[in-house]
Amino acid sequence: MADDIFAADPKAVIKGGQMLADTQNRVSEMRIMLNTRHSSVEIGDDSISQSLKKVYEPAAEQLFQMLAALGSLLTGHGEGTVDMGGIFDQANTTATSVASNGGKTH
């Protein structure tokens, strides 16, 4: 495993986590906004309205399901990524401290 090198920029990891959390919040807000607007749409009973309804309702339902799935996927991942950035930062700090003290942990 000596050839496998892993490095993380803690600040970039934290920023990425914050961006994931922001995205999840936006998805949630968008879903609420669209659901509110969808609920207020009234489609008539004439043939044109019924034709529109056949296309509109399934598309709207698919959109709501997709946004729900996306929100579920993102939930917690942003916060977890921020936490991982903190762990990487602490690991860097500890390694620098040990190296500065000639390999001693105290």
Image: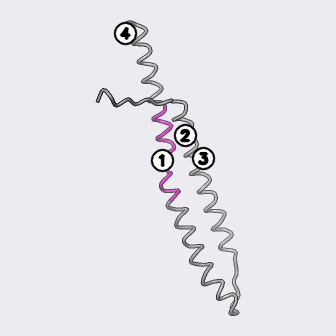
Q: Which residue is mark 1?
A: 76
Q: Identify the residue at the far front of this view.
A: 3
- Residue receiving disc 4: 106
In the rendered image, which quarter contains the C terminus? top left
Q: Which quarter shows the N terminus?
A: top left
Q: Which residues are magenta?
A: 70-87
In the displayed structure image, the side of residue 104 where residue 49 appears, left or right: right
Give the residue number, with chain letter if any, for mark 3.
22
Question: Is 31 situated left or right of 6 in this image?
Answer: right
* Alpha carbon distance from label 3 to label 4: 40 Å
Residue 86 located within the stretch drawn in magenta:
yes
Look at label 2 and name its amino acid: Gly
**Residue furthest top as drawn:** 102
Which labelled disc corresponds to residue 16? Answer: 2
Q: Position of residue 52 (x, y in %)?
A: 66, 84
Ranked by sequence position, the earlier of labels 3 and 4 is: 3
Q: Residue at x 51, y 37 (%)?
A: 82
